[in-house]
Image: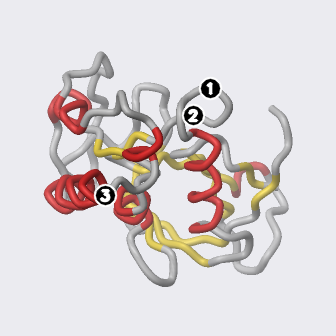
Amino acid sequence: MVDLNSSDVFELCITKGYECVAYEDIIPIRLVHIDAPEAGSECYGDEAELELAGLLLEGMPVSAVTDPNLPEEDAGGILQAWVWNSEFLVNLEMVKRGAATPYFPNGTRGAFDQRLLNAARKAKAAGRGLWGACPSVRLEGANLQHACPPTRTSNVSPIAGVLRLSRTPR
């Protein structure tokens, strides 16, 4: 099974069918350059997790691509990627819906950062999602320096797989 780990991390099953038969077929992926509130502990966290679950439906084929301008992994060793479902870029759609904000650790910039910022400005102006629900959220946070040391960068091939989601406790 594959878990939706948080509002911006999920696990992707690399498969030729609809079954993950070995743990090695499962890759945790962080939606790069966005920060979604954590479910159960932060304002709008439960709603953000539901938004991600709606964008990444079980059995849906998705593609994940790393950005050659960014670290391949986050500080915790999780693959960071731009993720597409059959309709759109999931990272960007989370920001458009107000379920996440742009997040640029150490000031790093990637392929879609200007689009993320524009989408956040529009979502904020419309009061969508966390912008309407959480008065303390600030767009300026996208430009804060965070204590996540950069890791190695590399060019990797796109990853494609099928989502298998479950809601099991860890």
At horizontal 41% and vertical 46% (from top left) the residue drawn is 132
Mark 2 secondary-structure assignment? loop
**Mark 3 lies on residue:** 123
Tell me which numbered mark, 3 or 1, is placed earlier along the sequence: 1
Q: What's the distance in space between the residues labelled 2 and 3, CA to CA?
A: 19 Å
**Mark 1 lies on residue:** 41
Under mark 1, the amino acid is Ser
124 up-or-down from 136: above or below: below
126 up-or-down from 141: above or below: below
At horizontal 65% and vertical 77% (from top left) the residue drawn is 60
From the top left corner, tell me how far across and down residue 1 is, in percent: 82, 55
Mark 1 secondary-structure assignment? loop
At horizontal 53% and vertical 33% (from top left) the residue drawn is 43
Q: What's the distance in space between the residues labelled 1 and 2, CA to CA?
A: 6 Å
Camera-nearest residue between 112 and 140 = 140
From the top left corner, tell me how far across and down residue 2 is, in percent: 75, 54
Mark 1: give few (<14), some (14-19) or many (20+) Cα within 10 Å.
few
Tell me which numbered mark, 2 or 3, is placed earlier along the sequence: 2
38 up-or-down from 19: above or below: above
